[in-house]
Image (spheres, rainbow, N blue to C red):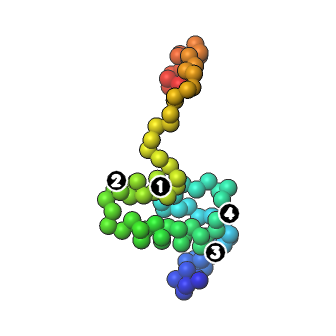
Amino acid sequence: MTYYEKTLLRKWVIAGHSPHEMPPSRYLCLTGSEPYDFLDIHRMDKEIRRDMKGMNKDEQKAYLMEYMGWTDDEPSTEGTDFIEPSEWDQDHPFGL
């Protein structure tokens, strides 16, 4: 652990948090089911920030999607049967 990380961790704990509590990530959407703590998230954000340096917004988006395992491809509907929406779905105000 670096001196800077120790300082950040101390500030986190002084603010009333546990060192094992997961802080919000600046770049990633993490749910809480992952076993990440303060330093894990800080180091992941630092790595992402370093890797994205010099990228434009589209490149950053592609990088983050790949990092999280997401793709921009539409799921294949080949071989699946289309189910007609029920009356309730058709009348639903949000068009579900």
Q: Which amino acid does label 4 sit on?
A: Pro
Q: Residue at x 55, y 80 (%)?
A: 5
Assign the N terminus to one quadrant of the image. Answer: bottom right
SS assignment at label 3: helix
Of marks 4 and 1, the one in the foreground: 1
Of marks 3 and 4, the one in the foreground: 4
- Residue 66: mark: 1
Q: Which amino acid does label 1 sit on?
A: Glu
Ranked by sequence position, the earlier of labels 2 and 1 is: 2
**Residue 37: image x %, image y %?**
64, 68
SS assignment at label 2: helix
Of marks 2 and 1, the one in the foreground: 1
> For mark 2, what is the residue?
58
67 left or right of 31 in image? left
Q: Residue at x 32, y 67 (%)?
A: 54
SS assignment at label 1: helix
**Residue contact at pointers 2 and 4, CB within 8 angstroms:** no
| Other residues around mark 1 within 10 Å, as few (<14) / some (14–19) / many (≥20) | few
**Residue contact at pointers 2 and 1, CB within 8 angstroms:** no
Is 8 drawn above or below residue 27 in the view shown? below
> For mark 3, what is the residue?
13
55 left or right of 42 in image? left
Q: Nearer the viewer, residue 51 or 32?
A: 51
Is 62 drawn above or below residue 54 in the view shown? above
Q: How far apart are marks 3 and 1 (CA)?
A: 32 Å
Say which quarter of the image contains residue 13: bottom right
Q: How far apart are marks 3 and 2 (CA)?
A: 36 Å
Ranked by sequence position, the earlier of labels 3 and 1 is: 3
- Residue 7 appears in the picture as rendered: no
> For mark 4, what is the residue?
35
SS assignment at label 4: loop
